[in-house]
């Protein structure tokens, strides 16, 4: 299996930043957001070490790996693993667009 690097789509960056900012504002500190950042980074490391660890979805080549209340949607490409979206599973699933 070739070595791949992680690449974030603009949507993934925006969704993750929005989640982190929401909790900073809601909680009045960065503690939860820092812990969440570490958890998601660990999840992405798992994906990098075992590309097919996530469940296949009905959305083309997109796979998903769940971590607590969050889902990391990603696609395995020839040279990269593209993180497509970080999703808070407590949100309305009808709003989910990959």
Image (tube, rainbow, N blue to C red):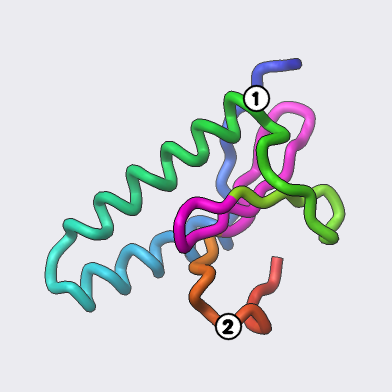
Mark 1, residue position = 4
CB contact under 8 Å: marks 2 and 1: no
The label nearer to you, 2 versus 1, is 2
Is tag 2's residue or tag 1's residue first in the polypeptide sequence? Answer: 1
Q: Quarter of the image holding residue 78?
A: top right
- Under circle 2, the secondary element is loop
Tell me: 41 left or right of 7. Answer: left
Counting the numbered discs, the total is: 2
The C terminus lies in quadrant: bottom right
Q: Quarter of the image holding residue 1?
A: top right
Where does the magenta region start and end? 66-85
Whether residue 69 is in magenta: the answer is yes
Q: Tell me which residue sits at (13%, 65%) in the image.
A: 29
Q: In this view, does 92 lie above or below 27?
A: below
- Under circle 1, the secondary element is loop
Pinpoint residue 68: horizontal percent, then vertical percent: 45, 56
Q: Which label number is shown at residue 92?
A: 2
Mark 1 is surrounded, within 10 Å at the Cα level, by few (under 14), some (14 to 19) or many (20 or more) other residues, namely some
Q: Which label number is shown at residue 41?
A: none
Give the alpha-carbon distance from disc 2 to disc 1, as whole Å: 32 Å
Q: Tell me which residue sits at (49%, 56%) in the image.
A: 13
Pinpoint residue 59: horizontal percent, then vertical percent: 82, 60
Pinpoint residue 19: horizontal percent, then vertical percent: 39, 67
Q: Is residue 93 above or below residue 56?
A: below
Whether residue 93 is in magenta: the answer is no
Pinpoint residue 86: horizontal percent, then vertical percent: 53, 59
């Amino acid at each position: 299996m070739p070595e791949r690097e992680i690449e974030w789509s603009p949507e993934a960056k925006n969704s993750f930043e929005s989640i982190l900012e929401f909790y900073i504002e809601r909680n009045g500190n960065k503690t939860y957001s820092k812990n969440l950042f570490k958890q998601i980074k660990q999840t992405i490391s798992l994906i990098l070490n075992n590309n097919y660890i996530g469940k296949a979805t009905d959305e083309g080549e997109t796979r998903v790996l769940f971590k607590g209340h969050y889902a990391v949607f990603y696609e395995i490409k020839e040279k990269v693993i593209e993180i497509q979206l970080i999703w808070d599973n407590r949100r309305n699933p009808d709003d989910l667009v990959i």
